[in-house]
Image: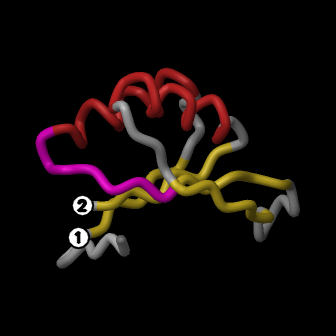
Amino acid sequence: KCAMIISNKSSEINQRIQVEFNSSGTMIKALGGYSQEEKGIIYFVVNTFTLYKLKQLVQEVDPGAFISIMDVSEIVKAK
């Protein structure tokens, strides 16, 4: 699975992900379509077993965050 986490506290969430998962996501700068406020998006690949832990972590840091969960069919890492 992959999660796209949209939040005003994306840096804090990414720091917690680094500590809790010993990994990090890809940070993307974004602009809210309605609010026109700067936001951050974290793209993070996670397995099904740790998805619940990720949701809890995000909820603790930013209860107003938006999380989109998607299936990932393949991950290819360039050497």
Tell me which amino acid carries mark 2: Lys
Judged from the image, the secondary structure of the residue bearing numbered disc 1 is: loop
Q: Is residue 13 above or below residue 76?
A: above
Residue 72 image position (x, y, % from top left)? 24, 72
The quarter of the picture where the N terminus appears is: bottom left
Closer to the N terminus: mark 2 or mark 1? 2
Extent of the magenta region: 43-49
Q: How is the image coloured?
A: secondary structure
Judged from the image, the secondary structure of the residue bearing numbered disc 2 is: loop
Per the image, the residue denoted by label 2 is: 1
Tell me which amino acid carries mark 1: Asp
Q: Residue at x 46, y 31 (%)?
A: 18
Q: Is residue 46 magenta?
A: yes
Residue that sits furthest to the front in the current view: 79
Residue 62 found in image quarter? top right
Q: CA distance from mark 2 to mark 1?
A: 5 Å
The quarter of the picture where the C terminus appears is: bottom left
Q: Residue at x 39, y 39 (%)?
A: 23
Tell me, yes or no, whether the two marked residues, 2 and 1, touch with CB atoms within 8 Å: yes
Q: Nearer the viewer, residue 6 or 74?
A: 74
Residue 44 image position (x, y, % from top left)? 41, 54
How many C-alpha atoms fall within 10 Å of the one at disc 2: few (<14), some, or many (≥20)?
A: some
Q: Is residue 1 magenta?
A: no
Residue that sits furthest to the right in the current view: 36
Query: Looking at the rendered structure, which numbered label has been put on residue 71?
Result: 1
Left or right of 3, for residue 35? right
